[in-house]
Amino acid sequence: MENKSKFLPIIFLPAITTGILITLFLSGKIIDIPLGTAKGGIIGGVGVLVIMISVVAFYYLIFRLLGYKKRK
């Protein structure tokens, strides 16, 4: 049986980072969003999407580089 504990950082590090950044973004700590308006909803939606894509891309590159160095 395969040891699944070695895959936990691959799953949890991006999830925790994304959750923290989205919480900070939507609470207004990163930029001030006008809550309760259509403009605030658009800014919030685009911001959350950008955070999710950038965190996934960042961790993909990090894990690819770490995996590449381990193989050699």
Image (cartoon, rainbow, N blue to C red):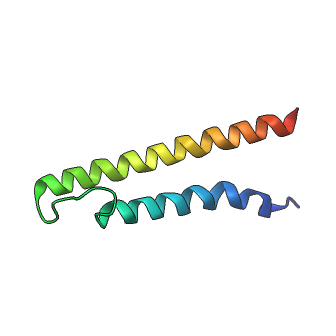
From the viewer's perspective, is 59 left or right of 31?
right
From the viewer's perspective, is 72 left or right of 35?
right
Front one among 21 and 4: 21
Quadrant of res 13: bottom right
User: Residue 53: percent from the left, percent from the top?
Assistant: 45, 44
Image quarter (top left, top right, bottom left or bottom right) of the C terminus: top right
Image quarter (top left, top right, bottom left or bottom right) of the N terminus: bottom right
Q: Residue furthest left?
A: 37
User: Residue 34: percent from the left, percent from the top?
Assistant: 15, 60
Kindly identify the residue that appears in the image at 41 percent across and 49 percent down.
51
Kindly identify the residue that appears in the image at 56 percent across and 42 percent down.
58
Q: Residue furthest top?
A: 72
From the viewer's perspective, is 17 left or right of 5?
left
From the viewer's perspective, is 60 left or right of 8?
left
User: Residue 20: percent from the left, percent from the top?
Assistant: 46, 64
Kindly identify the residue that appears in the image at 53 percent across and 59 percent down.
17
Kindly identify the residue that appears in the image at 46 percent across and 63 percent down.
19
Quadrant of res 10: bottom right
